[in-house]
Structure formats: C-alpha cells, structure tokens
C-alpha cells in the first residue's frame, strides 16, 4: 500500500468522508491511543481503531486475542460492535481509522471489511502512513463484492461479476425469519 496522497498542503478542505484534515488526524490519534489497550500476548501485533458514526459519535476499539486463536477479534470489528452497542442497530460508520505497528501498512482483514460493508457501506477508511500522511479509501473499493444475504452477484460470462443490488441499509429491510426486530 502506498501513501503517496494526501499530504498537508495538497489536501482538499473537506475529504470525501466529510471530515476535515484535522478531524482525520484526531481520529488517527484516537486509534493510536486505543492501540495501547490491545490484548495481544500471542502475536504482539497490537492494533487500535477509531470511528465516527453517521450520528457523530466516536468509538474506539483494539484487537483482543485468545489462547484458542480463533476467538481473537480485530480492532476494527470491536470498534464497530461498540458503535452498535452505543447507538443501536441503525448506527452506521462514517469514517474509520486504523493504527497498527509502526512501519506496517495495516490493511484490514476480509472479515472486518465484510462487517464494515454492512455497518458502513458508505464509509471511508483511513490508514496512516509516514510523516503525517494517510490514505483515504472507500469501503466499496476495499471490498467491491461482499457477501449479501439473499442477493447473489450476477455472473456475466467473460465480463466478470456485477453486484445485483446494494447492501441493505437497515437490518429491518432483510425479509424472512432472520429479520432483526
Ligand atoms: Zn480484521
């Protein structure tokens, strides 16, 4: 992952997430602070995340490992679950910043991107780089075709795959017995 853009002085006044440059730096600072709390005795790979919801709420999280390994949860998901716990089922992610070990490009894992595609389909993700730079990437670029319940991608022979419809904006729009009421 390159961090060629953006740098201070080249930035638009408002980023695509609607946050200003200082807002993004503050979000990255909060993610870095949350990283200190990480429970990572097995990998020693500590990660912090911070998000701003569509409602303007701020939530932080960190990775929490477990001796079984498989029960480990990433910082991104623990942060998004804190948002749901704090604001309810309709809360959605507006911007998410992730801070991991220095000099490591901390791209999110597929599981976290799948959750983010549902809880923040229009969200932007910020990965800090060197010297105060960061990347701003929309979740739709990070996970162009995620899993959606009951909506199968349309396969066009020789032309790749096209998504048939959008992710439901609310759990209540999912019909059937799995509806979250
Ligand atoms: Zn993850």
Image (cartoon, grey):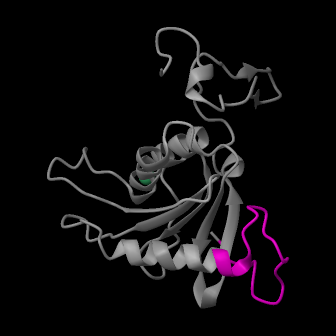
Q: Position of residue 29 (x, y in %)?
A: 51, 80
Which of 86 and 18 lies nearest the eye of the viewer? 86
Q: Measuring 40% from the left and 59% from the top, which residue is drawn there? A: 75
Q: Position of residue 142 (x, y in %)?
A: 65, 51
The mark tally for this picture is 0
Q: Measuring 84% from the left and 85% from the top, which residue is drawn there? A: 10
Q: Residue furthest left?
A: 67
**18 sits to left or right of 26:** right
**Residue 114: within the magenta?**
no
Which of 152 and 48 lies nearest the eye of the viewer? 48
Q: Position of residue 51 (x, y in %)?
A: 54, 61
Q: Position of residue 131 (x, y in %)?
A: 61, 91
Residue numbers of the magenta segment: 2-23
Q: From this view, report whether residue 161 is shown above or below residue 100.
A: above
**69 sits to left or right of 137:** left
**Residue 4: within the magenta?**
yes
Q: Main secondary structure of the magenta part?
A: loop
Q: Residue furthest top?
A: 176
Which of 115 and 109 lies nearest the eye of the viewer? 115
Q: Quadrant of the N terminus?
A: bottom right
Q: Measuring 82% from the left and 90% from the top, which residue is drawn there? A: 9
**88 sits to left or right of 139:** left
Q: Measuring 61% from the left and 59% from the top, which residue is drawn there? A: 56
């Amino acid at each position: 992952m390159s961090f060629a853009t953006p740098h201070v002085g080249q930035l638009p006044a408002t980023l695509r997430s609607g946050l200003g440059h200082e807002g993004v730096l503050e979000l990255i600072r909060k993610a870095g602070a949350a990283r200190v709390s990480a429970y990572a005795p097995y990998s020693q790979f500590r990660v912090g995340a911070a998000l701003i919801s569509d409602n303007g709420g701020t939530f932080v999280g960190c990775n929490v490992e477990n001796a079984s390994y498989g029960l480990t949860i990433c910082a991104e998901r623990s942060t998004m679950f804190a948002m749901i716990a704090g604001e309810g089922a309709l809360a959605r992610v507006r911007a998410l910043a992730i801070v991991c070990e220095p000099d490591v490009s901390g791209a999110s894992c597929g599981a976290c991107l799948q959750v983010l595609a549902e809880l923040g389909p229009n969200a932007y993700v910020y990965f800090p780089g060197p010297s105060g730079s960061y990347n701003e990437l929309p979740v739709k670029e990070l996970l162009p075709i995620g899993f959606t319940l009951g909506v199968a991608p349309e396969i066009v022979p020789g032309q790749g795959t096209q998504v048939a419809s959008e992710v439901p904006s609310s759990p209540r729009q999912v019909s059937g017995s799995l509806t979250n009421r």
